[in-house]
Amino acid sequence: MLDHFLETRIRKKIRLCDLLIENKISDIKHLSRCCSLTETSTRDFLQELNSDFSGIAQIILGRNFADIEIYEGVSKNELFYAIYEQSIFLECLKFLLLNVNSPFTVFVDEYFLSIAQAYRIKQRCAYYLQMIGLTLNKNTVEGEEYRIRFLIALLEYRFGIHCYEFSRQEIDLAHSFILSINPLLTKDFLEKTTDEFGFFEYLCILSWKRRNYSPFTESPKELNKVKELFAYKKIKKHADLTIERTLNIKFTENDYDYLLLIYCCTHNCLFSDQWTEDDAAQVNELIFNNPKSTMLLDLFENNFERVGEQLVKDPILKTVIIYLYKKFLLDLQGIIPSRNPSFFVGKKEFEKSIFLKTKEVIYQWMLKKGSKRPIDHNQLIYLSMQIELILRQYIPPTKIMIVSASLPNIEIIKLTLYRVFSDKKIHIESILIGTDPLENLNNLRNSVILVNKKYQKLLNKYKLEKNNKLIITSIDLELYHINRINRALFYYEKKKINKMI
């Protein structure tokens, strides 16, 4: 959600960077279309990126293309961080988070801003803070400490904005805490998975780094049932054995509640080797006996009318809801980052009708259960893609009709198709020219018809392309043919999904 508050230039650069990484070599016209820029502006932005990436990557600009060379040992996140560090909006958030008594003019002077420009940025920061449950008072962020910690960790993990220096010793201590709980992991594994689990680690470090501030004004009732899970006692035990003994401190009950909260609502690998069937059943009971969860299931059933009943009984949907539920603990859904942020930058490869239905369900649910904070748009995209994948398993296979005068050719094409596509995705039939009546083709609807070019004229009078996809092919199906078939199947699956919902 924070992404949408960033300066337009920053968002355009992030989109360009993501496209370059994804495609390696990109056509300038394609980049311009994707970013809604003129070709001249695209080239200007690419030149700026070259300067931003000094020492970590190089963009090679040709007459009609752009290529990126990422230097050895440099991660994608480092490229994104190099762009985000230019955001005055993010720097303003950082100033307001850490400020104690300094006047706002200190920030204005540091970044050589006009008064009008600076106060517009401050106003935007205040609006964002209000959306995530925090306020601005005398140039300082105020609100529940756990929310402030989540914002600090979000800035560090997602944007590379350092509100604090996280020392090597602190990171090692966070790793020791994790390893004491899950001994199957190694220190080397944790070092290499910061992009995956770093958000949890930063939140963990803040448990002692900002220990002077109690994470909660009062213990959250929403966590009471969660504290009955086996994880809570183990978190307390291992926090004492590692963090408290190393730092010679004593955590309060609020501190333990905070550690439980960050375990529940972030992506991490604590206890991943220790869940039993009874533990999983307890979680299912905890969530699906909750009126808020049954309300969500009812909304899915009512909004996805034709398949609603089937959908809500699907165990995969219930797993999806468990992970969604975790993000909504204490209304934190707006400040928990997407696990793969670059995946969503300008993402358009999802079914819009399902997205709109999913969005409607979640918004109705949030309204009914009294959520005051918005959900990250990327989380909605991800959820709708999960729903789409669940729905696709209910789609009947698309018919592929092979038209040929050779029975061996038909069998070979069948063999090839079933090696590429599941029988849940396609159903193959055939017409043997000279044996089967071609008039049978008149009954075909929403099918893919494969025919050799030399027989194409035989089929012209049936006007098959009005209701079907006709693909000219041969016995040796090449990648080009497979891609065309795949696109045709996707087209019909999309039609079936739209009809289904």
Image (tube, helix red, strand yellow):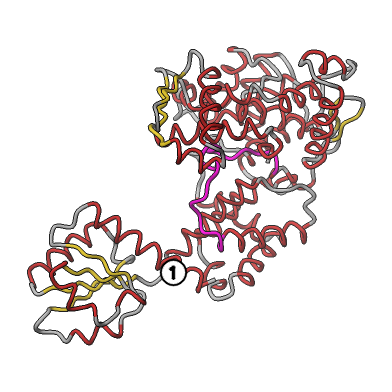
Depth order, front residue of 342/387: 342
Residue 318 located within the stretch drawn in magenta:
no
Q: Is residue 117 above or below residue 486?
A: above
Q: Is residue 465 above or below residue 379?
A: below
The residue depicted at 57 percent of the width and 42 percent of the height is: 36
Residue that lies at the very extreme toward the right in this rendered image: 138
The residue depicted at 28 percent of the width and 60 percent of the height is: 421
The residue depicted at 53 percent of the width and 23 percent of the height is: 49
Q: Quadrant of the C terminus?
A: bottom right
Residue 404 position, x and y percent, is 13, 73
Depth order, front residue of 205/105: 105
- Label 1 CA crowd tier, 10 Å (few <14, some 14–19, many 20+): some
Image side of residue 304 versus residue 423, left or right: right
Image side of residue 451 versus residue 321, left or right: left
Residue 180 position, x and y percent, is 54, 25
Total labels: the figure holds 1
Say if residue 304 shows up in the picture. yes
Depth order, front residue of 28/398: 28
Residue 458 position, x and y percent, is 17, 78
Tell me the quarter of the picture where residue 29 sits.
Answer: top left
Find the magenta span and give its range: 334-354
Q: Is residue 59 above or below residue 499?
A: above
Tell me the quarter of the picture where residue 312 sits.
Answer: bottom right
Kind of residue indicated by mark 1 = Tyr
Residue 476 position, x and y percent, is 13, 57
Image side of residue 333 versus residue 354, left or right: right
Q: Which residue is mark 1?
A: 394
Mark 1 residue element: loop
Residue 352 located within the stretch drawn in magenta:
yes
